[in-house]
Amino acid sequence: MRRLLVATLATALTLAGTGVAAQAAPAPGAPGIGDSYYPDYGNGGYDVSHYDIRLRYTPATDKLTGTTTILAGATQDLSRFNLDFVLDVSSIQVNNRPATFARQGDHELVVTPARTIAAGAAITIVVQYSGVPSSKVAAGFTAWTRTPDGALAIGEPQIAWWWYPSNDHPSDKATFDVSVSVPDGVEAISNGVQPRPPVRETLGYTRWSWRSLKPQATYLTFLTVGQYDVTTDTTADGSTVYNAYSQLLTPDFRDAAKASVERTAEITDWESTVFGPFPFEARGGVVTSPGTLGFALENQTRPNYSSAFFRRGSNTSVVVHENAHQWFGDSVSVRNWQNIWLNEGFASYAEWLWSEKNDEGTAQEIFDYLYATYPDDAAIWTTAPADPGTAELFGDAVYDRGAMTLHQLRLAVGDDDFFTILRTWTAEHKYGNATTEEFTALAEKISGQDLDALFQAWLYTPSKPVLAASLAAPVAPKSWAQISQTHTLLHEH
Ligand SMILES: [Zn+2]
């Protein structure tokens, strides 16, 4: 005992002179943050609080150059740590000293600072880089999309690797400044608000600046570059509305898109009455150029939509869906990608509630129709929403069976408790992360019911749940054609 005490004191005295706080030898941060589906996504050993992404992009060559400054805190004594990134790095500074770095696997960047970092210490990481993002393949594909007039950095779960270095997992959220210099006359759009209007730089370039004031997941941070027509407004409660429509849309697509996306403030106001206060500082939407994006994504404050959603006219279902994600997915984010039904099941159920509000079919009618029409051997029944696996991460079980689960919960606990559960969920986990087990526990707590059998059948069992009463053969609700078209495209993440 005495021997140990002396040794500890001696170590403490030695370390005191070097500023190292703890006695354990500094160790490398883990190459993954601990996701069961994507073990090497994100990283361990530090937590990011802010990204400052400062870029120049030239659409003609797809050349991206930039500097990203990351503010983080060490969560252990660190000898080195990883970032997730695929472009070509020219230098990295850690706490104002040059760091060495090496590539590992297809998206890991291993950074060794000149000095070790003590647990709890602040870390400032400055990464300078350049590259042609469309030439980089990782996880077997390229998430960065070139368009005839620019580019799109929109994807889930993978997108950040192609344009900024990060701790790429929703469980490490941060605030963002994104500033991009593009040729004069081209728009560069990202999340949040504009802290300053676009500013002309030298040599025919204009710099666009965007700021996200609330914690934001890396995959929800987007960049859309091209020729866009912009509309702006202010909501009744004073937040900015910024919508953008590709100038490459033909008039019929553009009008149908505007008849949908221009209703964003009205739709999010209605969603606020159902889900709780809108969590962010800005609202809006971007409709991208034809044939470039195959899906829509709930980018924080400003979803991006494929023009294909508007090929048959206006489509408010997809606007309802992507904006419901502002609560379910963006403010309350998955702890682990396995929890994805907490995003998609809830956003899909928002479409059912919208249909019900507009007398185009009740949630019960949509439930009945889905229950009766999916074949018994369809993936929706053979996949458990609470553990879909990566192959069915965006499959029917996550979307439709997730929404059906919520409807069964609503039937079991009644409307009052059901909507109290939703609003309590968005309030308790605002700007944070959550799991399926936390949701089921909350539902039991608020309702005072044992809901194990319901959740076991609907979330955890890879077979078709049996209903107490058999259904009459249902007809398709009026809203079904639009919801179904929306979902066919949404699954193409
Ligand atoms: Zn969705």
Image: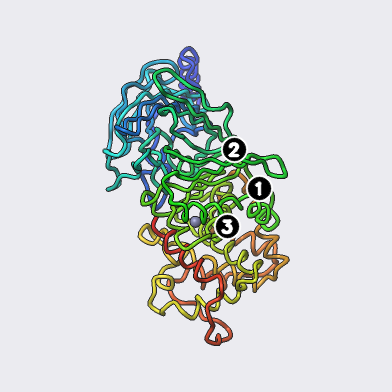
* Residue 77 in view in this figure: no
The furthest residue to the top: 17
Please name whichever residue, 110 or 489, is drawn nearer the observer in this view of the structure: 489
The image quadrant of residue 61 is top left
Q: Residues within 10 Å of mark 3 (few under 14, many from 20)?
A: many
Looking at the image, is mark 2 or mark 1 nearer the viewer?
Answer: 1
Q: Residues within 10 Å of mark 2 (few under 14, many from 20)?
A: some
Mark 3–mark 1 distance (CA, rounded to whole Å)? 13 Å
Q: Earlier in the sequence, mark 3 or mark 1?
A: 1
The amino acid pointed to by label 1 is Phe
The residue at 39%/60% (across/down) is 389
Whole-percent x and y of residue 473?
52, 86
**Which residue in the protein does label 1 denote?**
278
Looking at the image, is mark 3 or mark 2 nearer the viewer?
Answer: 3
Mark 2–mark 1 distance (CA, rounded to whole Å)? 12 Å
Callout 2 secondary element: strand
Whole-percent x and y of residue 292?
37, 49
Can you say whether 371 is above or below 315 in the image? below
The amino acid pointed to by label 2 is Lys
Q: Earlier in the sequence, mark 3 or mark 2?
A: 2
Looking at the image, is mark 3 or mark 1 nearer the viewer?
Answer: 3
The image quadrant of residue 211 is top right
Whole-percent x and y of residue 192?
56, 37
For residue 214, the mark is: 2
The amino acid pointed to by label 3 is Val
Whole-percent x and y of residue 267?
63, 55
**Which residue in the protein does label 3 denote?**
320
Mark 3–mark 2 distance (CA, rounded to whole Å)? 21 Å
Q: Quadrant of the C terminus?
A: bottom left
